[in-house]
Image: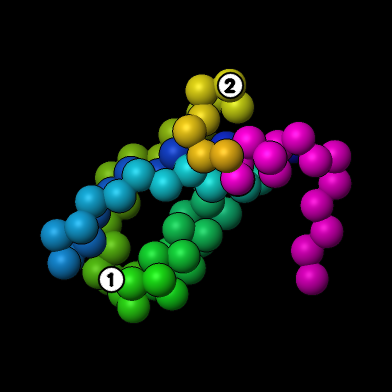
């Protein structure tokens, strides 16, 4: 069952971030964060420092996208 993870960290450029993503395991959440930050901000994995990964209850999640994904019964990935 997927969970919502809140990932907190910073980058070597000085940017701090808090991202909520959906994943089966914490590792999946980290991979999603690396992918999103790398593509949006042209950062390499070595430039991203993860400080904390925690599970968030759907009722206290701030990300609407994460809440919507939790409502779905089945997600098909290609």
In the image shown, does 44 or 66 lie closer to the viewer? 66
Residue lying furthest front: 64
* Residue at 42% from the left image edge and 47% from the top image edge: 19
Q: Is residue 63 above or below residue 58?
A: below
| Res 48 → quadrant | bottom left
Membership of 20 in magenta stretch: no
Q: Horizontally, is 63 left or right of 49 in the view?
A: right
Question: In the structure shown, which secondary structural element does the residue marked by tag 1 occupy?
Answer: helix
In the image shown, does 27 or 14 lie closer to the viewer? 14
Q: Is residue 76 above or below residue 4?
A: below
* Residue at 52% from the left image edge and 59% from the top image edge: 32
Q: Which residues are magenta?
A: 65-78
Q: Position of residue 22 (x, y in %)?
A: 60, 45
Q: Are marks 2 and 1 in contact (CB under 8 Å)?
A: no
Q: Earlier in the sequence, mark 2 or mark 1?
A: 1
Q: Residue 59: give its label.
A: 2
Question: In the structure shown, which secondary structural element does the residue marked by tag 2 occupy?
Answer: helix
Q: Position of residue 42 (x, y in %)?
A: 34, 78
Q: Horizontally, is 17 left or right of 75 in the view?
A: left
Q: Residue 46: give its label.
A: 1
Q: Is residue 29 above or below residue 61?
A: below
Membership of 68 in magenta stretch: yes
Q: Is residue 55 above or below residue 7?
A: above
Q: CA distance from mark 2 to mark 1?
A: 33 Å
In the image shown, does 46 or 9 lie closer to the viewer? 9
* Quarter of the N terminus within the rendering: top right
Q: Position of residue 18 (x, y in %)?
A: 35, 44
* Residue at 50% from the left image edge and 61% from the top image edge: 31
* Quarter of the C terminus within the rendering: bottom right
Q: Residue 2: give its label.
A: none
Q: How many marks?
A: 2
Q: Horizontally, is 68 left or right of 64 in the view?
A: right
């Amino acid at each position: 069952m997927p969970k919502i993870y809140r990932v907190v960290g910073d980058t070597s450029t000085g940017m701090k971030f808090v991202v909520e993503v959906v994943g089966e395991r914490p590792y999946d959440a980290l991979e999603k964060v690396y992918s999103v930050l790398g593509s949006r901000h042209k950062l390499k994995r070595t430039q991203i420092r993860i400080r904390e990964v925690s599970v968030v209850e759907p009722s206290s999640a701030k990300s609407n996208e994460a809440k919507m994904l939790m409502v779905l019964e089945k997600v098909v990935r290609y």
